[in-house]
Amino acid sequence: MVDFFVVKEGEFGRVEVVNNQHDLVMHAHPYTHFSFWLGGGLVHSRVGQHTVQIGPDVALGVNSHASHDLRLNDAKQSAVFLNLYLNDAWLDAQFKDLAHAMVLPHPRIGITPDVHAVRTKLLTHLASPLLEHAMCLEADVAELVSKTIVSAMTAEQLQAMPVRRRMIDYRLRVAIAHMQDNLSRPGMAEEVAQVVGLSRSRFFELFHDQLGTSPLVFWNAMRLEEALTRLSACEENMTSMATELGFSTPGNFSRFFRDHRGVTPTAYRRVCHAF
């Protein structure tokens, strides 16, 4: 069975239609992430202290870098999703008139009929071979996100959004830059506290407080994002890619990728290059 049906990229970020046949481990993305259930078995996701049951009338919304997993309610039933991975700068620009940064106060988002209708239109355009529909992609994504934020979130959720995004502590910015420069070094996420002069416990506390994740999950997210970029861009040798991302064998890289994205890197590349 094909795991990924569509992968498209644009200034907004990435949109995909995927059939999740496996649980996904605790992971994170450098994007604000929305998941809309399309069919199959129901699933649930843990985001911080919250557990969200995702289905026909409930979508998942996860802030950038926040740790979350995805669990099938029934391991024998896969679930099809429309996933949006949105650049925070693009997202904030779409809603500048609301005078709120798009920082979601809760991962559970109720789905209204308006959201269902716009989601269906986006899916129709994604499946269409017509160029005019492909050119509508960014507008479709913007409309779906707008309906989701304005129509599907409660008044209390909207009011709870901050006026601006929190500035990341400079020590974390230094640590993140150092991690980015050392993606091939196993254990970097554990060692980088020394680079910024923090104890291991304080470093982990700061990461969790400001980004809602751990250094290890964050570092894995950076490695995964680099892998996604490389897989969609070229036919790079899988062995060299695995080595440059800190994996001892292509098999270890493939298992890591599958645990985080639900599909092998080879299958993901095939779908990216098919459209």
Image (tube, rainbow, N blue to C red):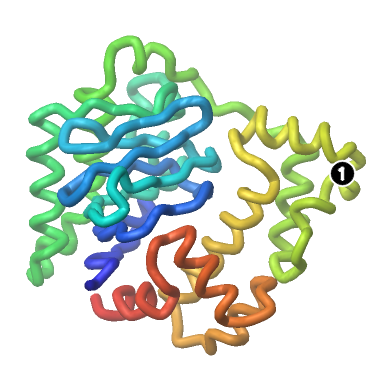
- Position of 5 compared to 30: left or right? left
Q: Which quadrant holds the N terminus?
A: bottom left
- Position of 236 compared to 6: left or right? right
Q: Which quadrant holds the C terminus?
A: bottom left
- Position of 7 compared to 235: left or right? left
Please tell me in which quadrant of the rendered image residue 126 appears.
Answer: bottom left
Q: Is residue 140 visible?
A: no
- Residue at image position (46%, 45%) is 69
- Residue at image position (40%, 53%) is 23
Residue 89 is situated, as x and y percent measured from the top left of the image, at 46, 41
Please tell me in which quadrant of the rendered image residue 267 appears.
Answer: bottom left
- Residue at image position (41%, 30%) is 51
Q: Nearer the viewer, residue 240 or 97?
A: 240
Q: Amino acid at mark 1?
A: Val
Q: Is residue 171 above or below residue 262?
A: above
Q: Residues within 10 Å of mark 1 (few under 14, many from 20)?
A: some
Residue 147 is situated, as x and y percent measured from the top left of the image, at 20, 31
Residue 172 is situated, as x and y percent measured from the top left of the image, at 74, 40
Q: Nearer the viewer, residue 229 or 267?
A: 267
Residue 85 is situated, as x and y percent measured from the top left of the image, at 38, 49
Q: Secondary structure at mark 1?
A: helix
- The residue carrying mark 1 is 196
Q: Is residue 218 above or below residue 253?
A: above
- Residue at image position (17%, 63%) is 134
Q: Nearer the viewer, residue 172 or 22?
A: 22
